[in-house]
Image (tube, grey):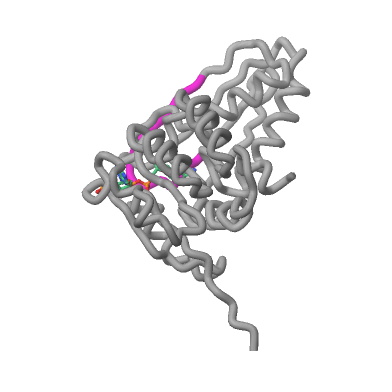
Amino acid sequence: MVMQTRKRLALVGYGKMGRLIEQLAPDYGFQVVLALDRAKNADTSAIDPDSFRDVDVAIEFSTPEAAPRNLLRLAALKVPAVTGTTGWLAHLPEVTAAVEKSDTGLVWSANFSVGVAIFRRLVSRAAELMRDQEEYGAWAWEIHHDAKKDAPSGTLLSLVRTMEETGYRRSIDVSSNRAGKHPGTHEIGFDSAADTITLRHVARSREGFARGALKSASWIAGRKGVYTFDDVLFG
Ligand SMILES: NC(=O)c1ccc[n+]([C@@H]2O[C@H](COP(=O)([O-])OP(=O)(O)OC[C@H]3O[C@@H](n4cnc5c(N)ncnc54)[C@H](OP(=O)(O)O)[C@@H]3O)[C@@H](O)[C@H]2O)c1
C-alpha cells in the first residue's frame, strides 16, 4: 500500500482567514504544523530556521504592516509562500527581489476568489469596449465589513488598474464603504444619458478566498519565481 504523506503547511497570520484555511487544508492534502499570530511573531522572530525546517509551504494572511517583513523572512528561509494580505504592495519590488535572490517561490493576490479573477477579465473587456465611448462616465465601488483596515480594497484598486491598462483614460470615480459583516462586493459601472451598465461581483463568504489560497499553495510548492493568482488559474 502506498502511504500518501501530507504536505506541511505553516500559517503566518491566524485570524479569520488563517483559521478558515486551517479547517479546509486537509481537502488539499495539507497538514497545518505551525500557526503564528501577532503574539507569537510581533517582530517576525518566530519565522526562524528551526521552526520552519520541515515546512513545505507557508500561507500568509496578516496585516499590511506585518506582511512585507514576514515575506522577507520566509524568502530568506527559502520557504515557498502564498500571501493574501492587502495594503502592502508598495513593498512588492523589495519582496520580489528577495524571493528571486533566494530562488524560491511566491504567489500574491489581493483576491483569491476564482469568480473575481473571471470578473476582472469581464471588466477588462468592458473597459476596452468603452474606451472610445466619450458619453459614458465610469465608477468603481466596493463594500466590506467594518474591520477591514485598507480602503479602497486592494481588489478595487487593481480593477481600476486593469481598466487603465486597456487604454481607458477618462476619470473613474472610486469609493468605498465599511459596514457590518460584508465579505466583499465589488462593482464597476458605466453611465450615460441613455443608460447604465453595472458589473458586480458579490462574495458570499470567505471560503472562496481560502480555497484559492490553498490551491495556490499546492501550485507554488516546487516552483520558483513571483506569481499572481491569475498565473495559477490561467497559466
Ligand atoms: N486575498 C484575499 O483573497 C483576501 C481575502 C480576505 C482577506 N484578505 C486580507 O488578508 C488579511 C488578513 O485578513 P483576516 O480577515 O484574516 O484578518 P484578521 O482576522 O484581522 O487576522 C489578522 C491576523 O494577523 C495576525 N498578525 C498581526 N501581526 C502579525 C505578525 N507580525 N505575524 C503574524 N501574524 C500577525 C493577527 O494576530 P493577532 O490576532 O494576534 O492580532 C491575526 O491573527 C487582510 O489584509 C485582509 O484584507 C485577503
Depth check: 143 or 89 in front?
Answer: 89
Q: Is 176 contained in the magenta span?
A: yes
From the top left corner, tell me how far across and down residue 188 is, in percent: 59, 30
Residue 85 magenta-highlighted: no
From the viewer's perspective, is residue 41 above or below residue 35?
A: above
Name the residue at 59% across, 38% down.
200
The residue at the point 60 percent across, 23 percent down is 161
Q: Quadrant of residue 70?
A: top left
Relative to 76, say whether 163 is above or below. above
| Quadrant position of the C terminus in the picture | top right
Camera-side residue of 205 and 46: 46
Q: Quadrant of the N terminus?
A: bottom right
The image position of residue 72, as x and y in percent, is 43, 36
Judge from the rendering whether residue 157 lies leftward or rightward of residue 14; answer left or right: right
> Which image quadrant shows ligand 1?
top left
Task: Read off the magenta span.
Answer: 174-185
* Residue 49 x %, y %: 38, 51
Vertical position of residue 160 compared to residue 49: above or below: above
Number of dots carrying numbers = 0
Residue 115 location (% of width, % of height) = 62, 47
User: Residue at position x 75%, y 30% from top?
Assistant: 125
On screen, residue 159 versus residue 26, left or right, reads right
Task: Name which residue lies at 21% across and 49% down.
Answer: 39
Residue 27 visible in the current orientation: yes
